[in-house]
Amino acid sequence: MNDTVTDAPATEPAAAGRQARLAEVLACPACHAPLRLDGGETIVCAACGHTGRRRGGQLKFGGFESEELTADALNRIKEFVKKRFNKVYPTAIKVLSPVMDRNLIMPFLRSFDLDRDLVADFGCGTHRRDQRVICMDGGTYPNVDIVTDLRKVPLAEGSLAGGISIAVLEHVPDPAAHIAEMHRLLRPGGRMLVFVPFMQPFHASPYDFQRYTEVGLREQFPQFEVLSVKVGAGPTSGMLWTLQEWLAMLLSFGSMRLYRAILPLTWILSPLKVLDLLLARHPAAAVTASGFVIEVRKPS
């Protein structure tokens, strides 16, 4: 699912409240012992000595190395745009992307009392979908609250009422480890909403490893109760992205330089994605859907 949700406006009271609630459940990513913020820049676990850093409102416990984000040429451009134009990046992607999602994220978030329930975005990218949601990512984007390896999140067990993971699991080599961490962090009865791709071309961010069918996706969450699996982005989106890549290859005559120059020109076809307003609801949409959304619950 592409970045299509307009970021919530920033407010200082909301940010202060979010950071205060985060401090209450902060835990060592190595041994899970409680961590305390003492006002200094370095955060040290008293139990095992593991360290993190704080810079302003952002906590850093690992994350991507700069070399990882620049290894793929197209991702290198993407990362530059994200960091240089992070405030307009989500809107630009919404317009230019060939993928039309079904706007399932915000209704899911509204199903929580975000003033009381702690909810996290696992792999938020440049988004802050709501000021009360904890933003976690491997990249040091300005909106990120916790820069971390999402397999070792510095939060206490059972500290979250819910979470979202949007277009993340295809980019990791060990999705089971990420799903296990979601399970650890959710309280009993807590829910996750996860989007994964099916019919999408390769797109490193900074890596790209797998795709999921509707049936295969259900099998990834054995520790959870599966509440629903839906088409998250329809068949037009799946076809259109592939067509754009195909056209760029066809017209570039084997030249990678020409391919990279032509590919942005194919975005003129992206408005065709509106056809998914109809086709995403077709009974056979799952056959060539661009991606699926699964909602799961940790058993009580």
Image: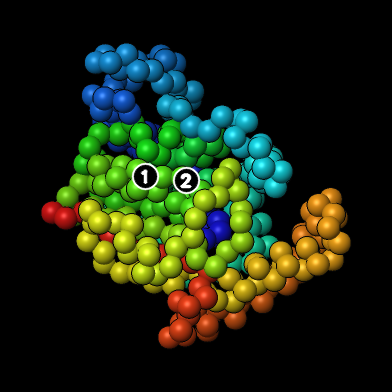
Report the side of 78 relative to 149 (left or right).
Answer: right
CA neighbours of label 1 inside 10 A, class few (<14), some (14 to 19), many (20+): many
Report the side of 104 relative to 272 (left or right).
Answer: left
Report the side of 17 relative to 199 (left or right).
Answer: left
Question: Residue at point 29% right, 20% down?
Answer: 36
**Dot 1 lies on which element?**
helix
Q: Compared with residue 260, is residue 80 higher up or lower down, i.e. above or below?
A: above
Q: Compared with residue 43, is residue 156 higher up or lower down, i.e. above or below?
A: below
- In this orientation, does residue 163 appear? yes
Residue that numbered label 2 is attached to: 172
Question: Residue at point 41% right, 45% down?
Answer: 174
What amino acid is found at the position of numbered circle 1 in the picture?
His
Inter-mark Cα distance, 2 to 1: 8 Å
Q: Position of residue 167 (x, y in %)?
A: 49, 55
Cβ atoms under marks 2 and 1 closer than 8 Å: yes
Say which of 129 and 288 sits in front.
288
Say which of 156 and 132 sits in front.
156
Q: Position of residue 193 (x, y in %)?
A: 36, 58
| Residue 105 lies in quadrant | bottom left
Report the side of 145 relative to 83 (left or right).
Answer: left
**Dot 2 lies on which element?**
loop
Residue that numbered label 1 is attached to: 178
Mark 2 or mark 1, which has the lower sequence index? 2
- In this orientation, does residue 120 appear? no
Question: Residue at point 85% right, 54% down?
Answer: 255
Q: Compared with residue 21, is residue 109 higher up or lower down, i.e. above or below?
A: below
What amino acid is found at the position of numbered circle 2 in the picture?
Val
Q: Position of residue 4 (x, y in %)?
A: 55, 60
| Residue 214 lies in quadrant | bottom left
Q: Position of residue 16 (x, y in %)?
A: 39, 34
| Residue 94 lies in quadrant | bottom right
CA neighbours of label 2 inside 10 A, class few (<14), some (14 to 19), many (20+): some
